[in-house]
Amino acid sequence: MNKPEISVVIPVYNEEAGLTALFTRLYPALDSLGLTYEVIFINDGSRDRSAAMLAEQWRARPDATCVVLLNGNYGQHMAILAGFEHTRGDIVITLDADLQNPPEEIGKLVAKMREGHDYVGTFRLKRRDSLFRRKASAAMNQLRERITRIRMADQGCMLRVYSRRIIDIINLCGEINTFIPALAYTFAQNPVEIEVSHEERFAGQSKYSLYSLIRLNFDLVTGFSVVPLQWLSFVGVVLASGSAALFILLLVRRFIIGAEVQGVFTLFAITFFLLGVIIFALGLLGEYIGRIYQKVRARPRYLVRALLQQRDNRAEHSR
Ligand code: UDP
Ligand code: MG
C-alpha cells in the first residue's frame, strides 16, 4: 500500500457495543471522499471484546486498517500519541470511537485544510452531554484561556485535523500527560475552527469519571503554562502584606487598649485558611515536580503488545 493521503486515528477503550456501528459508518464515509486513507485504531487496554473486534476489522480491510494494541490503559491522549507514531498520511484526523462526532463530517474538515490551514479544530453548537458536564466544561474553558494562551472554543471536541508537520513535531516531543488539541494548537501556524454536529454517545458510557476529567484539566493547565506558579508568588506577596498590616494594627491596639484576649477563634480561622493555601501551593508545586519526575525517569511512554499492519506497510514504515 502506498502512502495514503489521510490518516484517521481512533482510540478505543471498552467500546465493544459501538464498534460495529463505527465501522459501518466510518469506512463508507471515507470511501466517498475519493481519497486514499488509512484508519489507525489504538486499543487502550480494553477489557471487553474491543481488541478482538478490531482484529476482525483488520482482517476485513487490511489495506486501509492498522491496529495498535497497547498493553495497558494509558488514557485517551496517550493512545492517540501512540497512534500518531504510525500515521503516514499528509493529513491526520483524530476521532472518538463513540460516534459522538459523525465521521461524515470528515470531508468538511479536509476541505477546510485544503484552503491552506494546518489545524482545523471543531466546536459543537448543540452539545449532547449532561448539563453539569457542559457547565463544568465552560468554566474550565475560561480558566484555561486565562492561564494558557490556547484559544479553543470547545476543548472537548476531538474531531480535529492536523497537518503532517504538526504531527511530526508532536512525535518528536515525547510528551507524557498531555492534551492533544492544545499541544497541536501551540505548533499551528494557521489554525481555524469550524462547527460540527454532535450526537449522543452511540452505545456504552463515557469513559471519563469526574476524577479523570479533573486530572485532564490539571494536565491542561500545568502542562502548558507556568503562570500558576507565578500566581502562587503573587498570593504569597498579598498574604504577607495583609498579615504585616494586621500585625501593626494589633500592636497599636495593644498600646492603646491594652492586653486583649478576644479573637482567638478568628485567629484559628485565619491560620486554617493559610494552612489551606500552603497545602494547595504544595500540591501545585507537586504537579510540576511530578511532571519533571516522569520526564527524568524516561521510561517508555507506553508499550505496544501487538501491531496489526500489512507487511509491505511495515517495510515502508521502517524507512
Ligand atoms: N478512551 C481511551 N482511553 C481511555 C478513555 C477513553 O482510549 O482511558 C477513548 C474512548 O474509547 C473514546 C474516546 O477516548 O473513543 C473518548 O472517550 P469518551 O467518549 O468516553 O469521552 P467523552 O466523550 O465523554 O469526553
Ligand atoms: Mg464521547
Image (cartoon, rainbow, N blue to C red):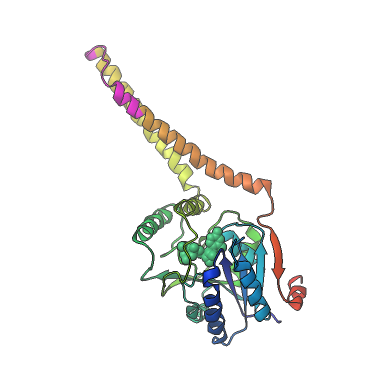
What segment carries the magenta color? 256-270
Counting from the top left corner in percent of width and height, residue 16 is at 55, 69
Residue at (38%, 68%) from the top-left corner?
128
Q: Is residue 196 above or below residue 34?
A: above
Image coords of residue 42 (percent x, y): 62, 66
Asked if residue 158 lies left or right of residue 265, the reply is right
Query: Which of the 4 quarters of the picture holds residue 152?
Result: bottom left
- Residue 20 or 218: which is nearer the viewer? 20
> Is 303 or 206 nearer to us in this picture?
206
**Rendering quarter of residue 33:** bottom right
Q: Which residue is drawn at 37% across and 35% down?
A: 238
The structure residue drawn at horizontal position 68% and vertical position 78%, both measured from the top left corner, is 59
Q: In this view, does 198 lie above or below 156?
A: below
> Which residue occupies the foreground of this view, 216 or 28?
28
Spot occupied by residue 146 in the image (x, y as percentages of width and height): 40, 53
The answer to whether residue 147 of the structure is visible from this angle is yes
